[in-house]
Amino acid sequence: MEWETLRKLRLLFERFPKSHNLVLFGQPSLLHGLSLSINKDIKSRITYSCTLKPLNDEDMERYIQAELKQAKMGINTFDEGALQVIVRSAEGNLRLCRNLCLGSLIEAAKETQKTVTLSHVNHVLIQPHWRTYEDVLKSPTAQG
């Protein structure tokens, strides 16, 4: 969200009854932007904030197992190597973990495999949206 939009929201909420609140979810850059002196009028209206910490590896594995159980799939759907790479690549972020698991499951299904292997996970991780901008520029397909 642009800062100008946030300012307009602040002005709009000044006209609402005091019982109305606005809940914002944002990346760490939002906190940085709020710390700038130009945004102190917005920051002064914050009554509660928190930072979500990334999940640890054990919690990530439990999350994957719970999702597999919910989908009525075996906990051995991902082999050990695939599971380790998924957990490490997701860096404690549930959305990244979910997306990487789904992409890996699709890769396995394309090969009519019932078990996701390291190869399937790596096929997902080489897709441009999983790599940094600099890595994409260095790839042979980007240069040619």
Image (cartoon, rainbow, N blue to C red):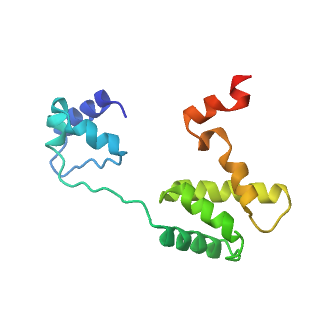
Snapshot quadrant of residue 62? bottom right
* 68 or 144: nearer the viewer: 144
Residue 144 as seen in the image, left or right of residue 133: right
**In the displayed structure, would residue 3 be above or below residue 113?**
above
**Quadrant showing the C terminus:** top right
* 42 or 33: nearer the viewer: 33
Residue 40 as seen in the image, left or right of residue 112: left
Rendered residue at 27%/47% (across/down): 22
Q: Position of residue 117 (x, y in %)?
A: 74, 63
Rendered residue at 24%/31% (across/down): 7
* 113 or 15: nearer the viewer: 113
Snapshot quadrant of residue 38? top left
Snapshot quadrant of residue 15? top left
| Residue 21 in sight from this viewpoint | yes
**In the displayed structure, would residue 110 be above or below residue 17?**
below
**Quadrant showing the N terminus:** top left
Q: Position of residue 84 (x, y in %)?
A: 61, 65
Q: Position of residue 34 (x, y in %)?
A: 23, 38
**In the displayed structure, would residue 25 be above or below residue 65?**
above
